[in-house]
Image (cartoon, grey):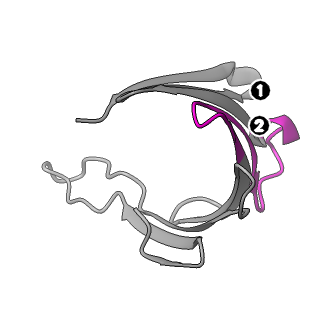
Amino acid sequence: RSVWSATGLSFGASLTGIEAPLVAGAPVSAVIARAGAAYPFGRLPLMVTTQFDFAIDAAPAVAVGAEYTIAQRVSLRAGYRAYFGETRLSPLIGLAAGVGVRHGAFALDYGFRPWSILGSAHRVTLRATL
């Protein structure tokens, strides 16, 4: 959810991975602070976003993306995430693409990200609004 919004511009932030291990010496999730903004382009069905990630044990990253919605039912998405200070990764790893379809109270989303030698990530989400 947006933390603050004015004239369509929305800002948000989150902090994840804050936890205490249940067993002494057990690994703890990485703490990641994220901040981002989104802006819809007036009457165009286009949303542009940016996000900044700061992790305690990794280089910072910045992501930009766009979503174009057709007939309020189909959304086409594309984006790129740059990892600062990381030279071992292929530039293709930052690419992302997806599509979403809405019908009534249901939505189906698909996302794709190439991961170089690790293969590719395919994410599918089915949502229902009650």
User: Sequence order check: which comes first, mark 2 or mark 1?
Assistant: 2
- Tell whether 38 sits left or right of 48: left
Quarter holding the N terminus?
A: bottom left
Q: Is residue 30 above or below residue 14?
A: above
Looking at the image, which is closer to me, 97 or 100? 100
Looking at the image, which is closer to me, 108 or 125? 108
Residue denoted by label 2: 93
Residue 44: image quadrant is bottom right
Query: How far separated are the C-alphas under marks 2 and 1?
Result: 6 Å
Identify the residue shown where x is 14% and y is 48%. Answer: 23
Identify the residue shown where x is 76% and y is 62%. Answer: 84
Residue 88 is a magenta residue: yes
Residue 64 is a magenta residue: no
Q: Is residue 43 above or below residue 72?
A: below
Secondary-structure class at tag 1 = helix
The local crowd at label 2, few if under 14, some if 14 to 19, many if 20 or more residues have their Cα within 10 Å, is some
- x and y percent of residue 49 in the render? 67, 59
Looking at the image, which is closer to me, 79 or 93? 79
Identify the residue shown where x is 86% and y is 41%. Answer: 91
- x and y percent of residue 57 in the render? 53, 61
Residue denoted by label 1: 116
**Residues tagged 2 and 1 counted as in contact (Cβ below 8 A):** yes
- x and y percent of residue 76 in the render? 70, 34
- Please state the extent of the stretch shown in magenta in the rendering: 67-93
Residue type beneath disc 1: Ser
Residue type beneath disc 2: Ile
Q: Is residue 94 above or below residue 56?
A: above
Secondary-structure class at tag 2 = helix
- x and y percent of residue 53 in the render? 58, 63
Identify the residue shown where x is 68% and y is 21%. Answer: 120
The total of numbered circles placed on residues is 2
